[in-house]
Amino acid sequence: MRFAVIGAGSWGSAVAWLLGSGGHTVCQWARNSEVACAINGQHRNPRYLSDVELPASISATLAMDEALGGADAVVMATPSSAVRTAAKVMAAYVGKGSAGAATPILLLSKGIEHDSGELLLDVLASELGTAERLAVLSGPNHAEEVARGMLCGTVIAANRPEVAAVFQEALACNSFRVYTSEDCIGVQLCGAAKNPIAIAAGVAQGLELGDNTAAMLMTRGLAEISRLVQAVGGQARTCMGLAGMGDLVVTCTSPHSRNRSFGEALAAGQTLADYERQTHMVVEGALACRSLPALAAKHGVALPITEQVRNLVWGGGNIDALLADLLERPFKPEFY
Amino acid sequence: MRFAVIGAGSWGSAVAWLLGSGGHTVCQWARNSEVACAINGQHRNPRYLSDVELPASISATLAMDEALGGADAVVMATPSSAVRTAAKVMAAYVGKGSAGAATPILLLSKGIEHDSGELLLDVLASELGTAERLAVLSGPNHAEEVARGMLCGTVIAANRPEVAAVFQEALACNSFRVYTSEDCIGVQLCGAAKNPIAIAAGVAQGLELGDNTAAMLMTRGLAEISRLVQAVGGQARTCMGLAGMGDLVVTCTSPHSRNRSFGEALAAGQTLADYERQTHMVVEGALACRSLPALAAKHGVALPITEQVRNLVWGGGNIDALLADLLERPFKPEFY
């Protein structure tokens, strides 16, 4: 099959590598000509995963029409904030299509559109027509490990099982286990909602609160995510899977996690501005801890940990006072 | 209130400390006179948590009748293998009681009775009469952290909410968050079934398979635990909670976890006999990986990871071949 991969960051490149290694033809759209030339000339992406040799079946282009022309299926791997813009450009080339005939599109970008609070598949559907062609992939998948053929698992959700199956068959191999799901809402919300919890886990780590505390934060974090997922129309059990617990555990425990290390910086007295100035990186969880409580409030759900992360990051709250607030919550049944 | 705590190991001592610190009177039953004398004389347990000062309201005894006489509630903290024997002795002192009047009993021991495959609350119920007096506690609770007042969460399940409430009120404090549940089966099975998964996580760690693999093992491990819980009559969502995911994460990631370090030893070519000879410790997961698949088979459920751990520990299987077997399983929906 011929795939278009939109985006040449580390995750897009790792998934292009998986497709190419599986015998598929890939045309990767890059924003940057240096990157596109190096992929075509040296079969390497000079900026991301630069030590991974890419199969010769992967080419790159700066032209969206060239990437999408003749593609049997599309993988979108832009930053979350660029999904709508990219979709507007793509619309001219992938067509609106009828439900059955439209080119299937797999979204790798995680999170929600922060201004509107919309889920990214809804953004895509509104820009590209039918939602029935869409799928979303999420799981504990560090690109660096995936592109080295290290074993991991992921989940692909789609409204139509045939669409999930297209991407499952194309991507699955012995080192990359692909499970399918019909819960697009759950898979997407888990990907967005894990990041504020990882900030909280980083704060706890910075305060040296211990292993028990870390496990409690992850578990109670997942409990609030599952309440949100259910309220928005997804399935709570998705939270128990690879997109939920799996990705949350990696994000909360890995020293390479940006959200977690931002939490450690907060515990050390830094602010978001300090951290972004030093690292030149966007902290997704810092945006999500504002947009998710707003979404949750619309659905009548509370996100106590996420809300305290928001108060800490944006309200300049005192860590001890915020923690004390959390601990003064009444004792309840575990699930309600 | 006056509590009897049966057992003076580290977890029994940590829970006695919680009760004593909460203003309750505790009489702790110990098997060993040196331990009992030190608790009474120096307010310290010389063998476990020896640097923790115990409140003066905690006394110890070698006599089961003295511990249980006049107790308003009982906490059982013996090793899992000693639960039936201890219950037989206790029966004379706690009475069978009518449902409403019987002294409530909280079980801290985790696991199942390996020979019979019975859940430990069923063992207690058969020895002590009514199941309605019983509760079980589980969660990510390293005793060492709990007895230092470090923050953590736990879940107490009971068939009757009033029984769970007795122990929730007695144990909960700002550093020890207690949630309640009615799913005794789920809470117990999670406690037993996490250990083989932790062995698998240790093997993966020993083979340096990476963070993604570890997260996949935990998540797919939890998926098989949840199938077992549901088949035996518990609730799958319990697996998403503190007794499930919470305890599993701590057990799979902490370098102090015995099951995990046994897995690392397996990856290095050691056998169970080697490991037990060196450490003088019982590896619970090595027993559970035999008894759980037998229980699962009775209920028509497969436990693929647990079964491969059993094949590795008891069948002398080759790690690479067992892993390859796991990876040849067909690709499926995430939950079914």
Image (cartoon, coloured by chain):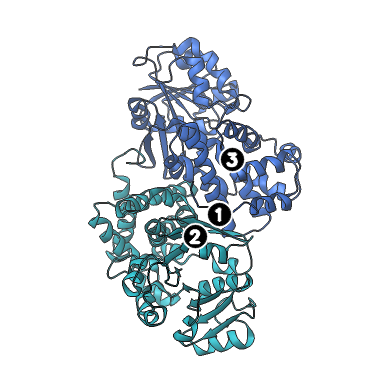
Chain colours: A blue, B cyan
Secondary structure found at label 3: loop
- The residue lying at 58 percent from left, 69 percent from top is B144
Q: Are marks 3 and 2 on the same chain?
A: no
Question: Which amino acid type corresponds to the residue marked 2 in the rendered image?
Answer: Gly
Task: State which chain disc 3 sits on.
Answer: A
Label 3: which residue?
Answer: A302
The answer to which of A159 and B210 lies nearer the viewer is A159
Residue A216's disc is 1
On the question of residue B295 being in view, the answer is yes
Question: Which amino acid type corresponds to the residue marked 3 in the rendered image?
Answer: Ala
Label 2: which residue?
Answer: B139
Question: Which amino acid type corresponds to the residue marked 1 in the rendered image?
Answer: Met
Point out residue B311 in the picture as x, y percentages from the top left corner. Answer: 29, 60
Q: Are marks 1 and 2 on the same chain?
A: no
- For the N terminus of chain B, the quadrant is bottom right
Q: Residues within 10 Å of mark 3 (few under 14, many from 20)?
A: some
The answer to which of B188 and A175 lies nearer the viewer is B188
In the image: residue A73, left or right of residue B170:
left
- For the C terminus of chain B, the quadrant is top left
Q: Decide which of tag 3 and tag 1 comes sooner along the chain.
A: 1
The answer to which of A313 and B72 lies nearer the viewer is B72
Task: State which chain disc 1 sits on.
Answer: A
Secondary structure found at label 1: helix
- The residue lying at 51 percent from left, 79 percent from top is B8
Determine the image quadrant of residue B202.
bottom left
Task: State which chain disc 2 sits on.
Answer: B
Q: Which mark is in front, 3 or 1?
A: 3
Q: Is disc 1 in contact with disc 2, using a CB cutoff of under 8 Å?
A: yes
Q: CA distance from mark 1 to mark 2?
A: 9 Å
